[in-house]
Amino acid sequence: MFRRHTLRSRIEYWSECQFALLPLHVSGRFLGRFWLLILLVMLPSAMAQASDVKFDDIFSAQATAGTLVVERLGQQKLWVHDKARAADPKTPASTFKVPNSLFALEAGAVADVDESVPWDGTQRRIKQWNRPHSLRSAIVVSSVPTYQELARRIGIDQMASFVRKAKYGNQEIGEVVDKFWLLGPLQISAFEQVDFLKRLHARSLPFSQRHQEAVIEILEVDRGDNWVLRAKTGWAVDTKPSIGWYVGWLELEAETYVFVLNIDMLDSKKHSLSRSVIAKQALQRITGEQLW
């Protein structure tokens, strides 16, 4: 079965749910939605969809609904649970810390992943946030204040430019530079998350390859003798029910499996852990390997 939960998963319940503010209902760009529909139609013909593996029982065991997209790179094999939901955009929440880390490096908001960002002195409920953080440590504890400070350093104009350049989701960030990934208007679907992660894995995003390598390095959450798991959680609280994310990829020997999961967070304490449980069980079923 699974190992004891890492620091990231143990504090996730307390970290991202702190931003349970009023929902912000913002419509996406028509053009973005148009291409999203095209993507949904074309994906089945673009690569071989695997029908030999199902995940209904995995979701049912966790008493929640959601979507899971897994793509094995190279051979272009795709597994999808709930295709319609996989095309439905959601607020990225803390999964945006992945591109935000890259943008901070590109903008020179920090020199590298180990430069310390000072704590502002505000006492917050999550004690791990009440200290200075580097990108390397901030992403482990999902420190929202650290990434908000980095976003303010980047600035609204440069942030908007970076989001467009990365073709991230609906590419809309509004006018508030430190909340758009938590409360909208930025939204992204599971299929779009997979596309972004594939480009990051390939180091083919239109940013410094060195910076992409640095972000990939700090995404590592677990490893074994012949595998590495790189992942990030997210918890979007601007909808009812709130949405939990788990995104990343598994490097298993010569194969790479990019995965994106989002689920309904009906039971906050249980489902904060269910995100990684569902993804890991699905990956084990796909690969036929007992990794955890």
Image: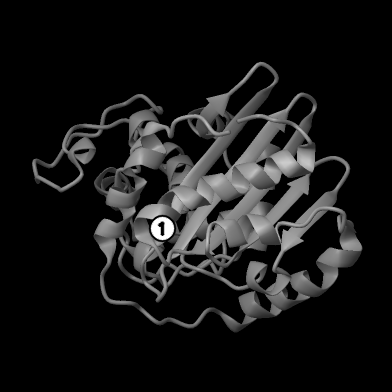
Residue at position x 77%, y 57% in the image:
54
User: Pointer 1: what residue?
Assistant: 235
Residue at position x 66%, y 35% in the image:
250
The picture places residue 26, in percent across and down from the top left corner, at 43, 81
The picture places residue 39, in percent across and down from the top left corner, at 76, 69
Please name whichever residue, 225 or 217, is drawn nearer the observer in this view of the structure: 225
Q: Can residue 204 be seen by looking at this rendering?
A: no
Please name whichever residue, 77 or 52, is drawn nearer the observer in this view of the structure: 52
Looking at the picture, which amino acid does disc 1 mark?
Trp
The picture places residue 210, in percent across and down from the top left corner, at 56, 28
Image check: 256 left or right of 136?
A: right
- Vertical arrangement, residue 208 with respect to residue 183, above or below: above
Please name whichever residue, 108 or 149, is drawn nearer the observer in this view of the structure: 149
- Vertical arrangement, residue 54 with respect to residue 115, above or below: below
Scheme of colours in the image: one colour
Image check: 23 left or right of 65?
A: left
Q: Quadrant of the N terminus?
A: top right
Residue at position x 44%, y 41% in the image:
101
Question: Tag 1, which secondary structure?
Answer: strand
Image check: 280 left or right of 39?
A: left
Q: Can residue 21 be seen by looking at this rendering?
A: yes
Q: Quadrant of the C terminus?
A: top right
- Vertical arrangement, residue 239 with respect to residue 199, above or below: below
The picture places residue 132, in percent across and down from the top left corner, at 21, 32
Q: Around disc 1, counting alpha carbons within 10 Å, would you say few (fewer than 14), some (14 to 19), or many (20 or more)?
A: many
Image check: 64 left or right of 7?
A: right
Based on the displayed image, in which of its 4 quarters is residue 202 positioned?
top right
Query: Quick one: which residue is furthest to the top in this view?
Result: 225
- Vertical arrangement, residue 276 with respect to residue 114, above or below: below
Residue at position x 55%, y 45% in the image:
277
Please name whichever residue, 234 or 292, is drawn nearer the observer in this view of the structure: 292
